[in-house]
Amino acid sequence: MKPHRWDALFDANMQLYRDARPKRAQYVLDFLISSGLGPASVLEMGAFSGKDIRYLAEKIPGALCCGLDKERGVFDELASRTTCCVVADAFHMPFRDRAFEISFHSGLIIVFDDLRSVDIIREQMRVTSGYAFVFGHNRWNLVDILVSVFKRLRGNSLFRYRRFTKGLLRTMAPKDATVIRIEYVDNMLLNIVR
């Protein structure tokens, strides 16, 4: 896969993503509520627009909600007021083992090959004591594929990303993790590991 130029993609797409509905955070929150969990700490890796971790900070009062991204621009004034903001690489996060009860990323693995994606998930599991949510685009979602092709043809290379099958996501979970479920959530597949 041809590498992305993150600085240009970040600048071109930031406001679009900040204004979008925090779909992944809503899914995580629904899971927490239905499971009776009230975590003291939540980490979003590759926060990009920061909308999901800000949403969770609002909905889970008192929880440490931390966004991590390699781009400082993710953390605007609102993010800095409502969340813990860390500028760092998701492959080598500056947190102790099992520092967060809940962790998630919204498609962070879609721009990396299998080996690098496994590295991200392994690092995610290292810092997670409870549930880790991994979102990746669904290989079989025809609508998402067609919309992405249209957006790429219009010049937005952000929509040049990988898609995953349930089987591939299952193989990416570390051997010491238990895959709770893999399911379809709009255009994404969700992999919950513990």
Image (spheres, rainbow, N blue to C red):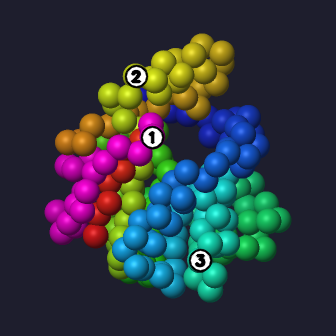
Name the residue beneath numbered marker 2.
Answer: 142
Query: Front-most of 109 and 101?
Result: 101
Residue 183 lies in the magenta-colored region: yes
Contact between marks 3 and 1 (CB within 8 A): the answer is: no
Q: Range of the magenta residues?
A: 169-187
The residue indicated by pointer 1 is: 186
Q: Residue drawn at (63%, 81%), measured in percent from left and top?
A: 61
CA separation in Å, label 2 and label 1 = 12 Å
**Residue 102 at x, y percent in the picture:** 44, 72
Alpha-carbon distance for marks 3 and 1?
A: 24 Å
Q: Is residue 105 left or right of residue 154?
A: left
Residue 1, quarter of picture: top left
Q: Earlier in the sequence, mark 3 or mark 1?
A: 3
Using a 10 Å C-alpha cutoff, classify the residue at mark 2 as few (fewer than 14 neighbours), some (14 to 19) or many (20 or more). few
> Of marks 2 and 1, which one's residue comes earlier in the chain?
2
Give the residue type that dot 2 points to: Leu
In the image, is residue 146 above or below residue 26?
above
